[in-house]
Structures are given as C-alpha cells and as structure tokens.
Amino acid sequence: MRIDWMEDVIALLDTGSVVEAAAMRNVSQSAFSRRIQTLEMLLDVALIDRRSKPNRPAAALRNNQERLRQAARQQRSLIKQIQTESRSGSRLVVVACQHAITASLGPQIVKLISGIGKAHVRLRSANLDECEALLLTGQADFSITYGMESEAAGYRAATTQEAFIANERLVPVYQARTVKEMLWRFHMGHLDVVAYPADVFLGVAVERHIYPHIERQCRLNIVAETALTLAAMQMASAGVGVAWVPEALAQADLDDGRLSDLSDELGSVHMQIIARKRAEDASDLHSRIWNALSRGGAVVP
C-alpha cells in the first residue's frame, strides 16, 4: 500500500471523521474524500460507513485498526531506516538484550557495534524467551543474554552460534547506612527481600540457588516483586529489602558506598553473559561484529 494511503487510513481512524482527517492530513475535504474513494476502488472494500451521519470509518476498518496501526508503524520505521542508511552510509544492527544487560552494558554494546562499519544500533530490551524469539525469527541480528554453566544448549546449538562474553554475578545488595540493622534482623531469623517473578530468568536463578539456603536459616519475607533489576536495586537502596542484582549494574553504587554487597552472608549466583547469532548469518558486517563480541573484553569493562 502507498505510504500516503496508509497515513490517510490512520488519520481516518484517529479522528473518526472525514472532515477532521482531511484537516489532519492538510488537504481539503473533497481531495481527501477522492483519495479514500480511489483506495476503496483498488481494495474493493468500503472504508467509510456512509450510512452514518456524520460519516465514520467502516466497521471492517475499526475491527482491524490495531493491525493497521502496527503496519503503519513498521512502514514508518522502514522508511526511516532506509533514509538513515542512505544519508549516513550506516546499516541498522538490531541487538536483543535482557533488560538487566541493557541497563548495565547497553552503552558499551552500542559503542562497540557502532564503531564497526558505521553501524546504527537498535537495542531491543526483552526477557530471555523474547530475546531468543527475536533472534530466531530474524527480528534481531544478535542476542546478548544471561546463562548458567549447567544450562543445556539443547535446540540452540542447531540453529544458532554462541560465544562467551564474560562472567557475571547476581549479588545481594542493600542500603549501606542501615545494613547493620538489616543483618541483625537476618541473624534473628527474618529477612525482607525484593524478589523477581518466578517466570523470569533471574527469578528462577534466585529461587533455585539462593532461597533454599536462606530458608534454612531464617524466615524469608517477600516485601515486593518486580521484573526490572533497576527497580529492584532502587528498592534495595531505599531499604525496602535485599535484592539480588547483576554486579555490573550495582558496581557504581557499591563503589560509592550507597549499597553494600552481602554475598558473604547471603550468597551470590554465578552466571555467564552469552552472545548468540543465527548460524546461517555470514554477512561481512555481522562477521566483524561477531568477532568483536566474541572477544568479550570490548563489552565488559
């Protein structure tokens, strides 16, 4: 569909009126009506319900408006990408990262990739399953996610290549100025915790490797739950409860003394940061990026 036609349809849906849609598109009502009529003839479908007064978008259009809006967004994104590549000579590279990696290593990832072949980087922040789906369906060129040494490669080995980037630890942190009081409560048999949902990777990691050990020593009290590591760290910093967060994410606050690392008392989880790409992808730019990612040290300080 032509770009201007798609924008006309979206304007019609946004305003619900031919008159207002014409004003939004900066054309006269008669010119807008002619454009809609031409599109109706080409598609052999009514786009306007002319039985209603005033006229409004037809039911078939309204019933499919979310898909039409999505198609319009994709169309605009594609055009913007083509324009960017044409003007700058850069090529779009899409990297799917788990949320915590985006927050902690996002700047380093962008700096590394953008310096290779004038690449324009789009970071897509998602959970582990979404990152894998984006990679396998071709919506991302690379994924960067956490993994555990005991994790089986399974189906991934047949469809993707993976490279170890760095080790990472999930460390328990808490507000430094009140940490002594919190540890006293812990030794008295009570620990307030900011938890992750059980269906996300970090939630599974903590549930499997940390909670059983702690529950043998004290009563675990889940004060709050969030899937966002930044939010968990902020709650720990505010004294809401202990949160297990990636060490790279918390490092600045640990160095500045705002947070305390309680790994010795509460235990930590050893993880890996893994980069993946589709096995069949062998473009020159992607090969150069893959070689740089595989070196690891260029991403992790």
Image (cartoon, rainbow, N blue to C red):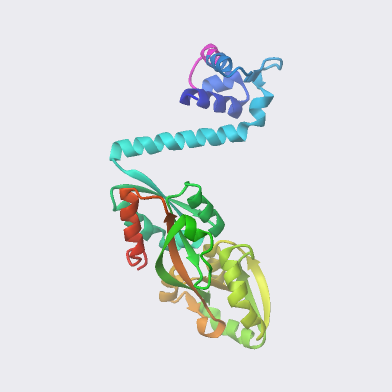
Q: Is residue 173 left or right of residue 279?
A: right
> In the depicted view, which residue is nearer to us: 47 or 41?
41
Residue 193 among those drawn in magenta = no
Q: Residue at x 56, y 34 (%)?
A: 69
**Region of the chain picked out in magenta, as a range:** 25-34
Residue 30 among those drawn in magenta = yes
Q: Is residue 254 above or below residue 16?
A: below
Q: Image quarter for residue 168?
A: bottom left
- Report if residue 296 is visible in the image: yes
Task: List x then y, in percent, for residue 52.
Answer: 71, 17
Task: List x then y, in percent, for residue 185.
Answer: 63, 84
Main SS, magenta region, reads helix
Quadrant containing the C terminus in the rendered view: bottom left
- Report if residue 240 is visible in the image: no
Q: Residue at x 52, y 15 (%)?
A: 35
Task: List x then y, in percent, for residue 48.
Answer: 64, 19
Q: Image quarter for residue 55?
A: top right
How many marks can you see?
0
> In the depicted view, which residue is nearer to us: 256 or 195?
195
